Image (cartoon, coloured by chain):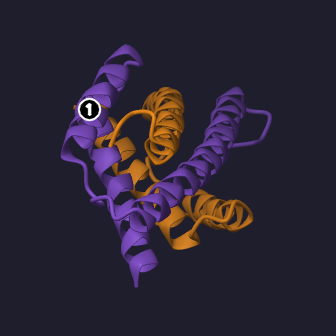
Chain colours: A orange, B purple
Amino acid sequence: MSLTDPVMNELLSLRASIDNIDAALVHMLAERFKCTQKVGKLKAEHNLPPADPAREQAQIERLRSLAVSANLDPDFAETFLNFIIKEVIRHHEAFRR
Amino acid sequence: MSLTDPVMNELLSLRASIDNIDAALVHMLAERFKCTQKVGKLKAEHNLPPADPAREQAQIERLRSLAVSANLDPDFAETFLNFIIKEVIRHHEAFRR
């Protein structure tokens, strides 16, 4: 298939969009971890409990609702949040050591 | 702790930023899946192979490099991409059924 093939052009255009979105995701994630690292530092300095189940439940419910309005599987959104939170906990544990 | 406590104010401000970033992430993910669903449809219609190992390797290397420049753990960025790709494959399989 040559690069002038319209199918290949469409594929390359979609891949360019995916690459742009991935760059945005990486930078948003970096910014999110900056925030959670500040939260971790604040909690450690002021002896606040590291986990806050009520906050986490509210985050899950909000994200599921946002996912529905964005036409994204809410179960995937919840799994995604848990995936990120696992990394946040890893950071907090590293910070406390 | 009262809501006027500066520590609590700082915590609430950081949480509001995290919530804004999470909304952005959910919407970027929804847009990314729109693109990958178009890719899946295009590949299925034109009998292109669903996987492209060279493309995936290039995506991983690019994302790791972007992560380093954003001060994000490149291993986490790679795990994140694999997490997303797993969901993309699930969508493609559902589409082919």
Q: As drawn, is A84 to the left or to the right of B48?
A: right
Q: Position of residue B96 (x, y in %)?
A: 40, 78
Q: Nearer the viewer, residue B59 or A16?
A: A16
**Vertical arrangement, residue A55 with respect to residue A35, above or below:** below
Quadrant showing the C terminus of chain B: bottom left
| Image location of residue B92, percent across then percent down | 40, 69
Chain bearing mark 1: B
- Quarter of the image for residue A90 reads top left
Q: Relative to residue B51, is residue A90 depicted above or below? A: above
Measuring 32% from the left and 36% from the top, which residue is drawn there?
B77
* Residue farthest along the bottom direction in this orientation: B97
Residue B64 appears anywhere in the view? yes
Number of marks in the rendered image = 1
Residue B81 lies, in percent from the top left, at 34, 45
Please state if B45 lies on the left or on the right of B60 as rendered: right
Which residue is depicted at the point 32% across and 59% down?
A: B48
Rendered-image quadrant of the N terminus of chain B: top right
The kind of secondary structure element at disc 1 is helix
Task: Decide which of A36, A21 is in the foreground and name it.
Answer: A21
- Residue toward you, A7 or B9: A7
Q: Amino acid at mark 1?
A: Ala
Residue of label 1: B58
Residue at the farthest right position? B4
Q: Which residue occupies 52% across, 31% down?
A: A20
Q: Is residue A94 visible?
A: no
Crowdedness of circle 1 by 10 Å Cα count: few (<14), some, many (20+)? Answer: few
Residue A51 location, x and y as percent?
46, 53
Along the line of sight, the residue nearer the viewer: B65 or A32: B65
